């Protein structure tokens, strides 16, 4: 049995773990990242749609080879075929190759001084004693503090006695990469409705040159059956070539109750740092992971890895993003409660009230609370939603 020691141990080399590692190692502490797979970024389960503002905020430059396309807006479709656009003159988001983006982040973490061990799965974790012990096969890693970035299936959260993501907030996601499709390469498509994707939506994300990522998330249904139906509706069910299929879990529950404990910080999907409206977790998860990297490195320098000192992580991310998660969760619950005919009515009303123009002007892909409050202020929208909610009450 061999042993090694580090100051900060990060479990998981996805974007959250790598950003936490980058930020911590910039502050001159020893950081080791464990990744169970032999290659960074694989297997990939992501549509790769990221806001340009969010990427800038995370210190990710856009000259990387990971950028596949730029988009300047989204077209929203109702179940019966109504639609509206939310758009800007200039690109607001890019579509990335997540494998290459994760490798870019790994490079940034290495350049800052972190070490990454591939093919190394954290199996057992022990928080008793004056260091955290993590077993991986014949090897034990000891650390002052652990950053859990295992993703949605985190076992460390449970081992630490924290409440994990609830099963009802985890949706099945399925995504196909298609060639030979006729899509507008400047716009993402969002298709709403229980008949399309119960509990979520279907998306079409253009990659350029007639290629697109087409996917959906759903709860309580078979995503393969739904996507076949969607492909028929959207593309006539033929004339394209399927290049790749990926599945994964989409988180819509919002953050877990507590994201810190004695010698532990939880980041990314493991912490539920994902937008409940869209299932996007790279940007907001990355912002929280950067905070975790800073807090962990300061705690190591102070020699205080206790729960009270580490609670500053949760205080900071809640101050910055708590309102965003709350509003997005609220919006997700409302949309999920609406039957398809109500979504159609809502589309009519949004168009009449000129909401797409408001969203085009003021909307932000990651910070959605201002558009959501704009909607709440419109009485007609609230009245419509209320009247439908009343019909659902027993
Ligand atoms: C279908 C689909 C489409 C999506 N599209 C988007 C999108 O367009 N935009 C967006 O922002 N987000 C999107 N997301 C969400 C996004 O993929 C996640 O929020 C993001 O990957 C979370 O990053 P993470 O680092 O927390 O976790 P992950 O990316 O899951 O990384 C966790 C890493 O930890 C490793 N690991 C796990 N357990 C261990 C262990 N015990 N020991 C060692 N290593 C371990 C895993 O191998 C993995 O590499 C999508 C998700 C799905 C399912």
Image: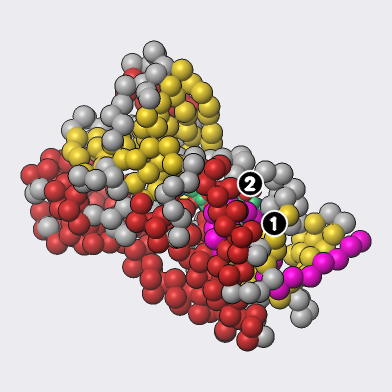
Q: Can residue 325 be seen in this view?
A: yes
| Number of other residues with Cα within 10 Å of mark 2, as a class: few under 14, some 14 to 19, many 20 or more | many
Image quadrant containing the N terminus: bottom right
Asked if the stretch drawn in magenta spans residue 380, the answer is no
Mark 1 — residue?
A: 116
In the image, is 166 to the left or to the right of 32?
left
Residue 322 percent across, percent down from the top left: 38, 68
- Per the model, the C-alpha gap separating discs 1 and 2 is 10 Å
Q: Looking at the image, is 250 positioned above or below residue 57?
A: above
| Number of other residues with Cα within 10 Å of mark 1, as a class: few under 14, some 14 to 19, many 20 or more | many
Residue 56 percent across, percent down from the top left: 39, 58
Mark 2 — residue?
A: 40
In the image, is 349 to the left or to the right of 163?
left
Q: Nearer the viewer, residue 60 or 268?
A: 60
Determine the residue positioned at 43% across, 21% down: 179
| Mark 1 touches mark 2? (CB < 8 Å) | yes
Asked if the stretch drawn in magenta spans residue 7, the answer is yes
Determine the residue positioned at 76% across, 56% down: 123
Q: What secondary structure is found at the residue carrying circle 1?
A: strand
Pointer 1 or 2: first along the chain: 2
Residue 276 percent across, percent down from the top left: 39, 53
- Residue 22 figure quarter: bottom right
Q: Which of 25 and 310 is in front in this view?
A: 25
- Residue 183 figure quarter: top left
Determine the residue positioned at 31% across, 40% down: 71
Q: What stretch is highlighted in magenta?
A: 1-21
């Amino acid at each position: 049995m061999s042993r090694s020691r580090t100051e900060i141990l990060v479990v998981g080399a996805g974007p959250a773990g790598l950003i936490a590692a980058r930020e911590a190692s910039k502050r001159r502490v020893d950081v080791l990242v464990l990744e169970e797979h032999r290659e960074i970024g694989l297997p990939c389960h992501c549509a790769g749609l990221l806001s340009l503002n969010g990427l800038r905020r995370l210190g990710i430059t856009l000259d990387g080879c990971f950028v596949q396309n730029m988009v300047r807006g989204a077209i929203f479709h109702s179940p019966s075929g109504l639609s509206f656009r939310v758009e800007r003159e200039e690109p607001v988001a890019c579509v990335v190759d997540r494998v290459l983006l994760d490798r870019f982040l790994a490079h940034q973490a290495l350049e800052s001084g972190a070490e990454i061990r591939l093919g190394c799965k954290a199996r057992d974790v022990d928080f008793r004693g004056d260091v955290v012990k993590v077993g991986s096969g014949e090897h034990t890693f000891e650390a002052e503090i652990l950053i859990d970035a295992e993703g949605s299936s985190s076992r460390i959260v449970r081992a630490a006695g924290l409440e994990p993501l609830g099963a009802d907030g985890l949706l099945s996601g399925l995504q196909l990469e298609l060639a030979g499709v006729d899509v507008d390469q400047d716009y993402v498509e969002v298709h709403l409705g229980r008949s399309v994707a119960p509990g979520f939506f279907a998306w079409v994300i253009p990659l350029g040159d007639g290629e697109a990522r087409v996917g959906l998330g759903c709860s309580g249904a078979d995503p393969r059956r739904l996507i076949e139906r969607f492909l028929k509706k959207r593309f006539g069910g033929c004339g394209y070539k399927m290049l790749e299929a990926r599945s994964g879990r989409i988180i819509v529950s919002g953050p877990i109750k507590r994201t810190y404990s004695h010698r532990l910080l939880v980041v990314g999907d493991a912490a539920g740092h994902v937008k409940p409206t869209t299932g996007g977790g790279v940007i907001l998860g990355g912002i929280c992971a950067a905070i975790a990297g800073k807090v962990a490195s300061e705690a190591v320098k102070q020699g205080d890895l206790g729960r009270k000192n580490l609670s500053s992580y949760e205080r900071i991310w809640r101050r910055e993003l708590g309102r965003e998660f709350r509003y997005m969760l609220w919006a997700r619950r409302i949309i999920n409660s609406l039957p398809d005919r109500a979504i159609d009515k809502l589309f009519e009303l949004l168009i009449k009230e000129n909401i797409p123009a408001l969203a085009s002007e003021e909307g932000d892909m990651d910070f959605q609370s201002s558009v959501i409050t704009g909607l709440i202020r419109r009485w007609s929208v609230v009245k419509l939603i209320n009247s439908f909610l009343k019909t659902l009450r027993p």
